Image (cartoon, rainbow, N blue to C red):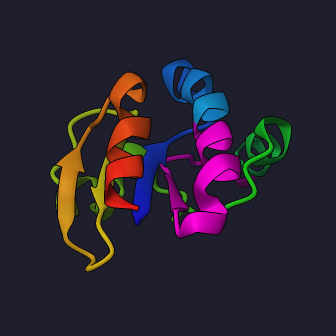
């Protein structure tokens, strides 16, 4: 079960969601839950600093193209924060789940 988490260091809503993501990761990672962070930053130093400050220990990537990244179009994103949840078979089962319902959905899939 993988949560693809689309975010950026300058996005305050994204940063506010990071503690929830961190708690979910710590709670469910050993049961097969993974997070893959995709950042829409343009400044590597700011991005890496946010990763460290927020304690994001799961894999993170960024092409440093910001919201002009082709990833925005590839996933049909219009805003961040955004997320996509994949089941064990790699199928998309949810898009843009709010933090309040994310944990129950993860538990069901695990």
Image x and y of residue 62, in percent: 55, 61
Vertical position of residue 28 compared to residue 31: above or below: above
At 71% from the left edge and 50% from the top edge, which residue is drawn? 26
The answer to which image quadrant residue 18 occupies is: top right
In the foreground, 100 or 47: 100
Q: Is residue 43 magenta?
A: yes
Q: Residue furthest bottom?
A: 89
Image x and y of residue 100, in percent: 40, 22
Vertical position of residue 39 compared to residue 96: above or below: below
User: Split into 4 quadrants, where in the image is the N terminus?
Assistant: bottom left
Q: Is residue 52 visible?
A: yes
At 26% from the left edge and 37% from the top edge, which residue is drawn? 96
The answer to which image quadrant residue 92 occupies is: bottom left
User: Split into 4 quadrants, where in the image is the C terminus?
Assistant: bottom left
The answer to which image quadrant residue 24 occupies is: top right
Q: Is residue 22 left or right of residue 66?
A: right
Q: Is residue 31 magenta?
A: yes
Vertical position of residue 34 compared to residue 22: above or below: below
Image x and y of residue 68, in percent: 34, 50
Q: What is the span of residues highlighted in magenta in the rendered image?
A: 21-44
Q: Is residue 60 visible?
A: no
Q: How many marks?
A: 0
Q: Is residue 77 left or right of residue 19?
A: left
Q: Is residue 56 left or right of residue 76?
A: right
Image x and y of residue 17, in percent: 55, 27
At 42% from the left edge and 27% from the top edge, which residue is drawn? 99
């Amino acid at each position: 079960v993988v949560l693809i988490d689309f975010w950026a260091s300058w996005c305050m809503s994204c940063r506010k969601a990071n503690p929830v993501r961190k708690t979910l990761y710590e709670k469910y990672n050993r049961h097969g839950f993974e997070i893959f962070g995709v950042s829409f930053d343009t400044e590597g130093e700011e991005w890496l600093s946010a990763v460290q400050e927020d304690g994001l220990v799961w894999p993170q990537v960024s092409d440093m193209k910001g919201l002009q990244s082709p990833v925005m179009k590839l996933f049909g994103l219009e805003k961040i924060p955004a997320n996509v949840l994949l089941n064990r078979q790699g199928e998309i089962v949810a898009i843009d789940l709010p933090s309040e319902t994310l944990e129950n959905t993860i538990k069901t899939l695990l």
